[in-house]
Image (tube, grey):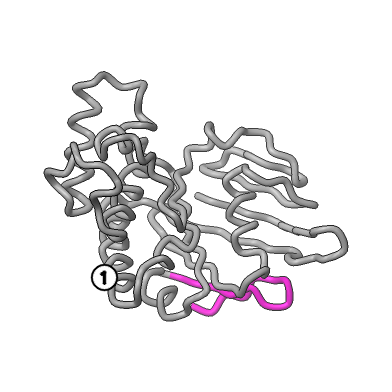
Amino acid sequence: MLVVRNLTIQYQDNQVLQGFELELAQGEIFALLGGSGSGKSSALRFIAGLDEVRSGSVALDGELLSDNGQHQTPPESRGMGMVFQDYALFPHMSVEKNIAFGIDYQSKREQQIRVKALLSLVGLSGIEKKYPHQLSGGEQQRVALARALAPEPKLLLLDESFSNLDQKHREVLANQVRGVLKKTNTTAILVTHDKAEAVAFSDRYGSIKNQRLQEEK
């Protein structure tokens, strides 16, 4: 499903990743562990097509998206969704409009049906007309997840997506999100610095050590 080969990342004279390789099957959830500056978020951004790197390739469903560090398919055409640490919701838009943002090619009726289905899926039915500032951090993160899932992405990328929450709410939300991903059979990568979170959330996880990915489970 996802194949990453020979990913090497270097910033000026500082090489942070060398020969990073990863394969994921459909519906599999992988957690990528690493400390600050280890290159884990950079690896995610390369997979998404947001950053170029020294070398490496990305293929999704047999289609080569990047080769030799150069992107051949732009981020918006990769069939990937992203959920960020800061949620990145549009504050001037209602929940309904935030979720429908990536499916504006659908009719209004189709958008409404999809939004309601996704809010039900993430346990937030009935908040379509609310705005982000009216929601808790956990609720905002679930809306961000619903927005990322709206276009039915082939791959979901989560970059420290629970780290703004306290430990109790992080554990609850991570468990809820895992359930949603399994229910929708969505392939996903979570970048995190928390090993307990990685173990609980993923089917497999690995750590970046000495510039390389070392799988641990």
Q: Position of residue 62 (x, y in %)?
A: 56, 41
Q: Assess disc 1: are there few (<14), some (14-19) or many (≥20) residues with their C-alpha within 10 Å of its C-alpha.
A: few
Front residue of 192/17: it is 192
The residue lying at 26 percent from left, 19 percent from top is 107
Q: Is residue 95 above or below residue 19?
A: above
Q: Is residue 133 magenta?
A: no
Apparent side of residue 141 relative to residue 112 in the rendered image (left or right): right
Residue bearing mark 1: 172
Residue at the right extreme of this rendering = 13
Front residue of 116/204: it is 116
Quadrant of residue 60 within the rendered picture: top right
Q: Is residue 209 magenta?
A: yes
The residue lying at 18 percent from left, 37 percent from top is 129
Q: Is residue 33 above or below residue 161?
A: below
Quadrant of residue 171 within the rendered picture: bottom left
The residue lying at 68 percent from left, 63 percent from top is 20
- Magenta stretch mostly in which secondary structure? strand
- Which type of secondary structure does the marked residue at label 1 adopt? helix
Q: Is residue 109 above or below residue 58?
A: above
Q: Position of residue 135 (x, y in %)?
A: 24, 52
Apparent side of residue 31 relative to residue 139 in the rendered image (left or right): right
Magenta stretch: give its range.
Answer: 204-217
Front residue of 142/106: it is 142
